[in-house]
Amino acid sequence: MLESRATIGPYWDEPLPDDEHLARQVEHGREEHLMLDARPPAELNQLTLARMRQTGPRFWIALAGLGALTLAFFIAWAIQIVSGLGITGLNRSVMWGPYIANLIYFIGIGHAGTFISAALRLMRMDFRRPIARAAETITLFGLACAALFPIIHVGRIWKLFYMLPIPNQRDLWPNFRSALFWDMMAITTYLIGSTLFMYVALIPDLAMARDHMTGWRRKLYSALSLGWRGTEGEWHRLEVVSNLLSFVIIPVMFSVHTGVSWNLSMAIQPGWHSAIFGPFFVVGALYSGVAAVILVMIIVRKTMRFGYFMREEHFNAMGIFLLILTLTWIYFYFAEWITNWYGNLPLEKAVQAMLTGPLAPLFYLMLFCNIVVPLGTLWSRRVRTSLPAMLVIGILIQVGMYIERVLIVSGSLSRNELPFNWVNYTPHWPEVTVTLGTLAFLGLLYMVYTRFVPIIPVWEVYEGQAMQGSRRVGRAVMSTRTEVH
Amino acid sequence: MAEEQSNGHKWTMIVDADKCTGCQACVVACHAENNVPVSSEDEVIRGRAMHWMRIERYWEGEYPNVKARFLPVFCQQCGNAPCEPVCPVYASYHSTEENINIQVYNRCVGTRYCGNNCPYRVRIFNFWAPRFDAPLEQQLNPDVTVRSPGVMEKCTFCIQRIRRGREQANIEGRPLEDGEIIPACAQACPTDALVFGDKWDENSRVAQMVPSERQFKLLENLGTEPAVYYLKGGETHVGE
């Protein structure tokens, strides 16, 4: 006899099956998976908004610390503008130093956010739902910090507008053949694109915040949510725009780091002039970027107590992604190194001798951080789901990838065609201050941001939860998923 | 930017390395002529010696059988210059009149990309505001800009002398004569190791010397087509 399986009632209030065995399975699923552990949207809203408005003493201490470092950064920058780049350690051969490495690094950590969000969205991966915005935010601020570095780097910051294609009476245009110009265009496009991408997905949450807040926050969110009411037409358009932007942003993302790498590889400097640099840098960026997203997830989960949203399954999934990227990165690095090594050309050999000679401590530290540690640990689920372990691995990958960029930029430059001009490079205080200060600045922006917008895309979470169901097959309960796209 | 013979001159320098004694008179002359600041000892140790022209000294062999090799290196005024396409603001561009590589100081924003892409490393960045210790500030050349901090600069083949020579010839209504224009370095060279002239003028000294058996170009394999030719032959060196 047929009986209707359809139950009428809210999706978050599905009763447990009467059978004890099945009930245990359902409960286990709810513990493991956010998507199965549905709660009423109102509860999730309250949870997110409450955390957003919380600022304990530790928040203010961290804010003050990061603020002080940020201040030091801006002071160092001001001193550098006034007194000239002479205060840095750069020299006649190593004209690009950590400032360019920082540009690559910060674009790199900003890389993964939008990629995770856009690519996983298109692939319908549910584990992206609670972490998408935390990842997109790091893209936004990572790019903003990266965009500072060409400005910090140039000799005459007050003439920087020459690089922009501004119509002028002398018909002077920037040089469209310059890789720096391509890079500038790519970064600008990506910054605008990823800001839009993030903002579009933010609108329903801003409207939600508007409906629950009073005072100045209500005014702020009213303006920012652009009059969102949540009609069916609005949701439909949001879906269309998000999918479109996802498709658009992925190629732009590739173009950005390819552009950055071409700054180096278009030059005939030995150690730079390599066709592999485009894809190699994209992979490197994703590698450090995914590690950065994991770090941010850990910090956000811990400090804002979002254990409900960010669970073991998310860290596990991100850990697997990181492991894949580790392997890809190793493959590219190996391919680049062995080609130069086997070719045995004097200049490439000189660069490699530089890396394994005077720079050997940095070089082997980089290999340890980027290869030994992730490859040795990430295969284990226990490591991937352990937050302290992932914190350490994430930080090590940041260190390793940062060193890798410095080695490529400054290490290569210190060896060139005429041995008379071989000069080694040591950073001076401005480079150190500016680098640490920018990291602090990124943290500061992120901290402040989490107190102004819901860092969890709540609507995406309950959209995912609403599409989940369970179905009994024999003695097992299977989770099912509805495609509404 | 292809160089066409129909217009202008192909200014060319010949460096006879066999004649060079490494005396550095050219380096000093260049500093004086082009208002190049004198770097302090500290700056030189930090690898920031500001010379538009430098004598690269290479040692060969082990003590006591050491031979010194001198190589005067300055901007090679490449016909196919790697520094030109990379500049985002056209501060480094190719002149169609002199057929040399020009650096426009007031256009330069100081990205230093040209410096990285120059295989000869002859582009100099102004890390500091220029400073001339007394009495050097009394002898600055009024024909040459004193460059502001944050811009790249390099050898110009003494373009102020080229311009002046050409204008003088124009006033007098005659073509330029070979040897009329001499850059400061060539003028100062006591052994006549530096010869300057227009390679497209078939009768010039330079044009006669270029086909020499001893001739080579620095880093010729890179295809930069330098306008500087080096002469080197036999086993001539200092300290024998």
Image: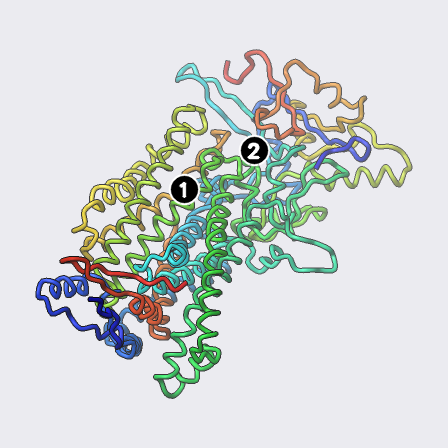
Where is residue A308, by image quadrant? bottom left
- Is residue B138 visible in the rendered image? The answer is no
User: Can you give x and y, in whole percent of width and height, for residue A286 in the image?
Assistant: 37, 49
Q: Please tell me whether mark 2 sits on a helix, a strand or a loop.
A: strand
For the image shown, how many numbered marks are present on the structure?
2
- Would you place residue B120 above or below residue A227 in this image? above
**Closest to the observer: A119 or A65?**
A119
Chain label for disc 1: A
> How packed is label 1: few (under 14 Cα within 10 Å), some, or many (20 or more)?
some
Q: Write down the residue under mark 1.
A: A425
The disc label shown at residue B54, or none: 2
Q: What residue type is labelled 1?
A: Tyr
The disc label shown at residue A327, or none: none
Q: Is residue B9 toward the left or the right of residue A463 in the image? A: right
- Would you place residue A241 above or below residue A420 in this image? below
Quarter containing the N terminus of chain B: top right
**Closest to the observer: A204 or A143?**
A204
> How packed is label 2: few (under 14 Cα within 10 Å), some, or many (20 or more)?
many
Q: Which residue is rendered at x = 62% and y = 56% of the image? A: A162
User: Can you give x and y, in whole percent of width and height, for residue A377 in the image?
Assistant: 20, 45
Q: Which residue lies furthest to the left in this view?
A: A20
User: Can you give x and y, in whole percent of width and height, for residue A340 in the image?
Assistant: 41, 29
Q: Is residue B47 toward the left or the right of residue A390 in the image? A: right
Q: How far apart are marks 1 and 2 (CA)?
A: 21 Å
Q: Residue furthest right?
A: B173
Q: Which amino acid does label 2 sit on?
A: Arg
Q: Is residue A271 toward the left or the right of residue A377 in the image? A: right
User: Can you give x and y, in whole percent of width and height, for residue A24 in the image?
Assistant: 11, 64
- Would you place residue A247 above or below residue A61 in this image? above
Which colour assignment does the render follow? rainbow
Q: Which residue is rendered at x = 15% and y = 65% of the image? A: A27
- Is residue B234 visible in the rendered image? The answer is yes
